[in-house]
Amino acid sequence: MTRSELIARIAQKNPNLTVKDVENVVRVIFSEIINALAAKNRIEFRGFGAFSVRKRAPRTAKNPKTGTRVEVSSRNIIHFKTGKELHNMLNKEDK
């Protein structure tokens, strides 16, 4: 789902809000999530999951095109852990 699809779906389910209002709300929410992760804070949505920032250690990688070894420095990555409700929905057995 793209951002515009998300905005359209929220606007459709909330006819009392204009598309522009929904667009602003989504923009502010994403902006706050980005700012919190940039500050290395954890973001948690109960039932959905949690985003956190982890440090990846430096390593030696291989260039797939040339086969040469390349040193990759340490970097921060975003880690996502699913919440219990989402995990259960994704892993329920079809009956």
Image (tube, helix red, strand yellow):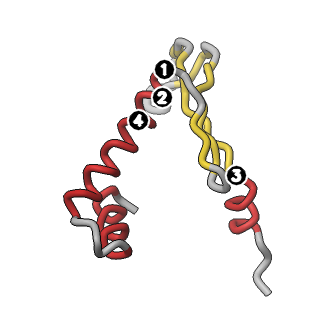
CA separation in Å, label 1 and label 2 = 5 Å
Dot 2 amino acid type: Ala
Residue tagged 1: 39
Q: Secondary structure at mark 1?
A: loop
Q: Which residue is mark 2?
A: 36
Residue underneath mark 3: 83
* Badge 4 density bin: few <14, some 14–19, many ≥20, Cα 10 Å: few
Q: Earlier in the sequence, mark 3 or mark 2?
A: 2
Write down the quadrant of residue 77 in the picture: top right
Taking the image as shown, residue 62 lies to the left or right of residue 82, namely left
x and y, in percent, of residue 80 in the image:
62, 41
Please report contact status of discs 2 and 4: CB closer than 8 Å, yes or no.
yes
> Badges 1 and 2: C-beta atoms under 8 Å apart?
yes
Q: CA distance from mark 4 to mark 3?
A: 20 Å
> Which residue ends up furthest to the bottom in the rendered image?
95
SS at mark 2 in the image:
helix
Give the residue type that dot 3 points to: Gly
Amino acid type indicated by mark 1: Ala
29 shown above or below 17: above
Local SS, label 4 = helix
